[in-house]
Structures are given as C-alpha cells and as structure tokens.
Image (cartoon, helix red, strand yellow):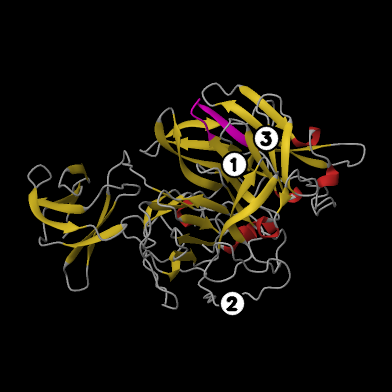
C-alpha cells in the first residue's frame, strides 16, 4: 500500500518483470517458485480431478488465515462457440486452494462455468456461493448456494422473466439476494440497448422484492462505450457490482459509465453519482478511476474499488486496487491508498479488492489470471497465477470449515520393486491433519498400524503389509476420528 503516492495511470506503462514462460497444459499440485520447472503429478486416488496449476512469483509469507477461493476458466473460449468438456478433463469450476497452491476442494464443471466463488452467510450459517452459466454468458445463469458439506441448499433465479447475469450475488441477513441482470431493450435512439437491472429476491420463495433498471435513471449520454459492439448491441452501462451501504441503500457500479451510483433501496432514485461524466463529487486526481469493478463500502467509511483503468484487450494502462473517502459536506472524493501488484498489470475486465480482517487486502487481477495478497504496510505476502493461462473473475481469502458427506478416496499401487503404496485424498475436507492406516486379515478385523501426517491434497503412505485388507481414517489435529475410507483388499 502506498499512501499519498501513486504511479501515472494514463499513457503507456511498460509491463515487465513477471515470469511469462508458457506453462499451458501442466498440472501442478503444490507450490512452485518463480522459474522452477512445473511437473505433471496426477492424483492417483482422484484421477477425475484436474484443477489448473498454481504458479507462485512470490510464495506465501505471513499471509492471513484461510484458503484462497477461485473459479478458473478459459477466457479464450469466449471467442467461439462454447464447447462442453467431460468433468474429468475440465480445468474449470469452483476451486479452493491453500497457500502452497494445493487444492482443498475442486468441483469440475465441464458443461457450465462458475464465477465469483466466495463464502457468504445464509440464515445465519456460512455457505459457499457462485454464479453458474455458460462461459462469459451474460444471460440465463443462476446462483448456487452450497452448505459446508458441499450440498446445494438453494439456487437463486432472476424473477419477472429476467435472465441472470454473472457479475454479482450479495446475500443479506434478511434471507434475500441482490443479483445482477442484463436485459436488451429497444429504444427510439438505440434499437438494441443493453441495460443493467438489480433485483432483490427472497431466496426461499423466489419473490422479487425490488427491481432497479438502469435505463430509467441513467442515459446513454453518460456512457464512455456508446458504440455498437460486435454483438450488434450497445452495452452502455455494464453493471458489475452491488453493495449495501451503511444506511441500507445500494452502491451500484457501472463499468462503461466509469461511475458509482448511490440508489435509494425503496424508490430506486439515484441519490448521487461518483465519477463519470456527471459526478456529484469533485474527484481528486489521485482518486480518479475508470472502468471499475467491485465497489464496496468498508466499516471505516472508506470505499474500495478495483480500478481497471482499461476496458479492452491490449490496453497498456495501470490497474490497481483503490481506497477513497467521501466528504459529504464538501462533496469531494479524496485518495486514501492504492494497492499495486509487484509487477505492473493491466486488467481489462473483471477483478476485485477484498479487505482482510488484519488490515491487509487480497486482490484478484481478473483477466491477468493472477492474485496478490498485501499486508497492512503494503508488503507482498503472496503473488500467484494460473500456470495454464486460466483466469478467475474474482479471487478471495476465507477461512473455510467444511467436511464432505462422502468417504475419503484411496488407491493402492504396487510399485516396480513389489512394495505397495496407498494414496489417499478427501476432496473438500478442511480438518484433516493426519491419516491413520489400519490393516488386518479381513475387513472386519483391522487395527491401527501407523499414522502419517497429511502432506497435501493427496498423501502417499507406504504399506507395511502385502496381503489382507487396508483402510485409512482421517484424524483432526487433536487426533479425533473424522471419517474412515472403505476397506481395500490387497491384490496378490
């Protein structure tokens, strides 16, 4: 974090210093330092899971507690027709990893794409949420709510015949969901105008409690992108985030007007505009932003923004995380801090800034396919990226406490020298600290043989027996038994 000082945002900025070696097609369970060769290391116990590799330019050092939440997908697929992939071959889907890049949980989605995987609260309980639809599809998707056993408890659909959009889902303490919707309408001036709609939907019943439509409050004359695009329409607004302000009203971000709108949650009236062509605030030069994402009011009253400062591939301007404060008496927006990657990056779409409890921030660099954690003093705690070129709409850090309902997966392999190795994993389990090996002459006559520390998503255990049956029991840090795998007969 740099207080009061910032880099020039407009004009050319040389991008360099990042490790750019092509690592496409390599899967890498576990961290690799910058420049270290990636190796293929498929999971023996779960060959159906193939999450993308995580490569580290700055390995984790002093990071906040918790795991990293991602939703990798291939952005190049947006250039053509969507191709369905068997789940066992898919590198896309909700993905949670630890600070070494080891998967904690992966849900491969071959026929749809997940966006915005995060931890939220529903009915007083922690839940995982994400948008699910076709790759970069602005219409037709829904939002999934999973409990900590990785089972669906609810699915949110847009109401009034609308089609859901990928950009945001915010669950509220009242059991409602604030969602984003894109809708194309015909107007006298623009035959195909893409509007942004915010709905508040009761999750349990699906009833729409509130709806706000951008075309009724924001004109095309506010847009920096009023032209017809390749799709044949005008995406003048580009709604991309919703936040509940401290007074209960809404903060709405529109990328293509480069503006934030304070919206009355009852009447829908725009109470003020921040940024863009018709700003109600005088914005200090250091606090200016463009084509922004992920606008959030913070407990101290400041606002964090992912300042893309770019809207098209090939742009060569600097993207950053930004924190500003508003003086409502003077109607002035001023600079508080900015958050920069260790190497300059241009994120032409997507991105987010998450405030961590200890004062640090976690930043997802969207189309750059990378994510960074910074400490309160601006020090780099972690900087990593997808090694295969995947990207994630947002990236977060949360403390996840979850236990799947299924059993741990095991596979016994006979090595070239005749010895046996048991491979074990339990996709999604967060409490496993050790694996206890049990063995015996039959499935009902087994006893503990050895205990081994969990070494990552998959742990390899050398078997001290060559016949009979074996199984493993998951143990937590206190030695409490969590769940046992099914017994396996050792084949001669």
The spot of residue 362 in percent (x, y) is 48, 55
Check residue 168 in the rendering and tell me which mark sits there, or answer none: 1
Residue topped by disc 3: 163
> Which segment is the magenta one?
171-180
Q: Which structural element holds mark 3?
A: loop
Decide which of tag 3 and tag 1 comes sooner along the chain: 3
Residue depicted at x 53% and y 26%? 203
Relative to residue 263, is residue 364 drawn left or right? Answer: left
Measure the alpha-carbon separation of dots 1 and 2. Answer: 32 Å
Relative to residue 311, is residue 116 drawn left or right? Answer: left
Q: Is residue 268 magenta?
A: no
Q: In this view, does 23 lie above or below 201?
A: below
Residue topped by disc 2: 16
Q: Is residue 123 above or below residue 427?
A: above
Residue depicted at x 17% and y 56%? 490
The spot of residue 189 in percent (x, y) is 92, 41
Residue depicted at x 10% and y 62%? 464
Determine the residue located farthest toward the right in the rendered image: 188
Q: Which SS type dominates the magenta stretch?
A: strand
Measure the alpha-carbon separation of dots 3 and 1. Answer: 13 Å
């Amino acid at each position: 974090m740099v207080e009061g000082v910032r880099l020039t945002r407009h004009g050319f900025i040389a991008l360099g210093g990042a490790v750019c070696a092509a690592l496409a097609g390599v899967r890498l369970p576990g961290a690799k330092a910058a420049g270290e060769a990636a190796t293929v290391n498929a999971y023996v116990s779960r060959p159906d899971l193939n999450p993308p590799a995580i490569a580290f330019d700055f390995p984790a050092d002093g990071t906040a507690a918790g795991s990293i939440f991602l939703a990798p997908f291939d952005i190049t697929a947006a250039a053509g027709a969507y191709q369905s992939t068997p789940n066992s071959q898919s590198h896309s889907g909700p993905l949670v990893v630890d600070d070494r890049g080891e998967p904690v949980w992966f849900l491969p989605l071959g026929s749809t794409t997940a966006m915005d995987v995060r931890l939220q609260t529903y009915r007083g309980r922690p839940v995982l949420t994400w948008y699910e639809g076709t790759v970069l599809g602005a219409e037709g998707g829904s939002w999934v709510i999973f409990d900590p056993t990785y089972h669906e408890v609810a699915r949110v659909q847009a109401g009034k015949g609308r089609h859901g959009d990928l950009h945001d889902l915010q669950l509220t303490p009242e059991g409602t969901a604030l969602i984003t919707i894109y809708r194309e309408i015909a107007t006298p001036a623009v035959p195909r105008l893409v509007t942004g709609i915010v709905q508040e939907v009761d999750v349990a019943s699906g009833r729409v409690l509130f709806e706000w439509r951008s075309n009724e409050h924001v004109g095309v004359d506010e847009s920096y992108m009023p032209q017809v695009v390749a799709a044949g329409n005008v995406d003048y607004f580009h709604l991309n985030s919703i936040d509940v302000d401290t007074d209960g009203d809404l903060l709405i971000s529109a990328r293509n007007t480069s503006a934030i709108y304070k919206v009355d949650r009852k009447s829908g009236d725009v109470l003020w505009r921040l940024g863009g062509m018709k700003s109600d605030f005088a914005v200090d030069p250091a606090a200016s932003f463009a084509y922004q994402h992920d606008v959030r009011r913070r407990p101290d009253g400041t606002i964090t923004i992912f300042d893309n400062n770019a809207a098209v591939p090939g742009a060569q301007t600097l993207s950053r995380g930004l924190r500003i404060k508003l003086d409502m008496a003077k109607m002035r927006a001023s600079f508080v801090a900015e958050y920069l990657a260790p190497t300059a990056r241009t994120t032409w779409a997507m991105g987010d800034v998450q405030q961590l409890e200890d004062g640090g921030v976690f930043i997802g660099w969207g189309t750059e396919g990378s994510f960074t954690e910074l400490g309160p003093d601006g020090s780099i705690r972690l900087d990593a990226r997808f090694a295969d070129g995947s990207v994630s709409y947002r990236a977060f850090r949360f403390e996840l406490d979850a236990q799947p309902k299924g059993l741990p997966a095991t596979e016994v392999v006979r090595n070239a020298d005749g010895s046996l190795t048991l491979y074990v994993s339990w996709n999604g389990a967060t409490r496993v600290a050790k694996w206890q090996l049990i063995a015996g002459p039959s499935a009902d006559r087994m006893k503990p043989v050895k205990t081994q520390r969990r070494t990552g998503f998959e742990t390899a255990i050398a078997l001290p027996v060559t016949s009979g049956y074996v199984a493993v029991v998951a143990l937590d840090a206190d030695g409490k038994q969590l769940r046992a795998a099914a017994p396996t007969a050792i084949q001669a």
